[in-house]
Amino acid sequence: MPESKLHGSGGYIIADLTEEQTKKADLGVGKLFLAPIGKLEIQKMSKHYCKICETEFSNPPKIHLEENTNEQVAENLILVERGQYTCQQCSSIIGEYRVFKKQDESSDIGQAKSSQ
Ligand SMILES: [Zn+2]
């Protein structure tokens, strides 16, 4: 599987993506973007480029967890985690990630027994 270049506001990350992640990252402008993918595992990222350092590093960026939330952003959609990928050297932000969860995935456990 070829590695993909994912653009963020402060540089890019080279990572190994699944087909589904590639689809999410492709906004139809001929580039792939970090933000729509969700959180990438550190093992999947092989390089990062930092605009501040003007250098491509041959290791993954750092992952900085900003907050764990349980914020409802739309009907049935919850933002569970928010954070950034940051440069190994200067800690500036390469890009951001957000992890969403659909509400109904975890809801109806133990609710189906209203027998009378
Ligand atoms: Zn840097």
Image: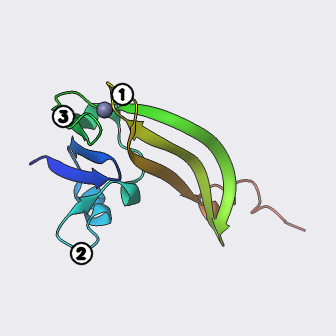
Asked whether 23 or 95 is in front, the reply is: 95
Give the residue displayed 85% in from the left and 66% down from the top.
115
> Which residue carries the number 2 mark?
28
Q: CA distance from mark 2 to mark 3?
A: 27 Å
Q: Which residue is mark 3?
A: 55
| Amino acid beneath label 2 | Gly
Kind of residue sitting beneath label 1 = Cys
Query: Looking at the image, which is closer to me, 40 or 96?
Result: 96
Q: Are marks 1 and 3 in contact (CB under 8 Å)?
A: no
Residue 63 image point, x, y percent: 42, 33
Whichever of callouts 2 and 1 sits on the residue coming sooner in the sequence is 2
How many residues crowd mark 2 within 10 Å: few (<14), some (14–19), many (20+)?
few
- For marks 2 and 3, give the one nearer the viewer: 3
Vertical placement of residue 105 versus 69, above or below:
below
Is ligand 1 less than 8 Å from the beta carbon at label 1?
yes
- What residue sits 40% from the left and 36% below the top? 92
Q: Is residue 101 above or below residue 45?
A: below
Disc 3 C-beta below 8 A from ligand 1: yes
Which SS class for mark 1?
Answer: loop
Label 2 sits on a secondary structure element that is: loop
User: Badge 1 local density, few (<14 within 10 Å), some, or many (20+)?
Assistant: few
- Contact, mark 2 vs mark 1 (Cβ under 8 Å): no
